Amino acid sequence: MITHFKNFTESIMLVAIIVVTASVIYGCNKIIDVDLPDAEPMLVVEGTIKEGEKPMVLLSNSMGYFDQIPDFQEIFVSGASVFVTVDSVEYQLEETIPALLDPALLLKLSDQFKVDPFEMAFAPLPVYSIVGPTDLIGVSGKTYDLRIEHDSLIATASTTLFPTVPLDDSYFYITETSTTDSLGIINIVYTDPVELGNCYRIASRRTNQYPDWHELAGEVKDPYFVYPLGSAWDDMILNGATYDLAYIRYPSENDQLDSLEQGLWKLGDTVLVKLETIDYNAFESILSYETAASAQGNPFASPTNVISHIDNALGWWYAYGEHVDTVICTP
């Protein structure tokens, strides 16, 4: 009798477990439809003016997260009127093509899109700049006001070109705790001006080629400058001080072939280290953009809005200077 009761009890418990498990599985698989509201497309601005160079502006329209990406030439905006004002003098930028840009601007565009300069020159991309001689070039201490007119929209922004802060030193070294005698990090040193509000952005590029035995033999390690996520910072904490920064290499698309070198520089590398000086508005926009980019695919990340200092549009307009050092990785 006791045995029958025990078997009956175990059967009841087994059925209960199956029912609960089935309920949980069914609950986890329940499809929830969310009706996402449509958002009106907004103008997106990517504009810069570098010390000693002409301005360059790209215009495009924002898209919904689940929208199908259109063809390349349909993404960017043509037919806008773009103006830059400095010292009360207004200049109208011309809509042109990459092939007619100054060589320095074409290289910057090539870096931005990670496309070979020759191919970039023939891309069907409307670019707003000035072709030929002009007085409109980036000058330290000047403020540049941007105005864009497109259809019934008027977008405006302003940026100031801060004095370029040079690198005091940059060098390669292998740490004492390193487990290899060929991989290390690069240290950079710079002195922040005493005025509060200087902001910075860093990038790097390995210009040497992969060795003969490598799968990518003969190819340049970094064809373009690499900006790490977290590339921008301000001088809120170390204003007016000398700053030592251990610069770890940001992963590139080829790192899956050299997994042991991720984050490190290698003996024999020739590295261009670029320190850009930007204003605070540019710092805020870039920082928020990189924060949002780093949160992609992370279900636990806090929602982040990209900060735009452009009225009636998204994106950025900023002036910058840059100092580039060459570091040869030797013991």
Image (spheres, rainbow, N blue to C red):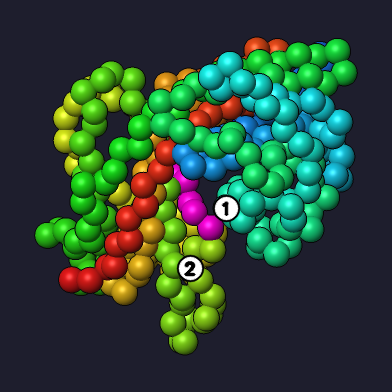
Mark 2 surroundings within 10 Å by alpha-carbon count, few (fewer than 14), some (14 through 19), many (20 or more): many
| Lower position in the chain sequence, tag 1 or tag 2 | 1
Q: Which residue is mark 2?
A: 221
Q: What secondary structure is found at the residue carrying circle 1?
A: helix
Q: Which residue is mark 1?
A: 104
The residue sitting at 78% across, 48% down in the picture is: 97
Q: Position of residue 165 (x, y in %)?
A: 31, 38
- Three-letter amino acid code at disc 1? Ala
Above-or-below relation of 92 to 107: above
Residue closest to the eye, 247 or 105: 105
Residue closest to the eye, 175 or 3: 175
Q: Which residues are magenta?
A: 224-229
Q: Position of residue 245 (x, y in %)?
A: 24, 43
Quarter placement of the C terminus = bottom left
Mark 1 surroundings within 10 Å by alpha-carbon count, few (fewer than 14), some (14 through 19), many (20 or more): few
Q: What secondary structure is found at the residue carrying circle 2?
A: loop
**Which label sits in the foreground, 1 or 2?**
1
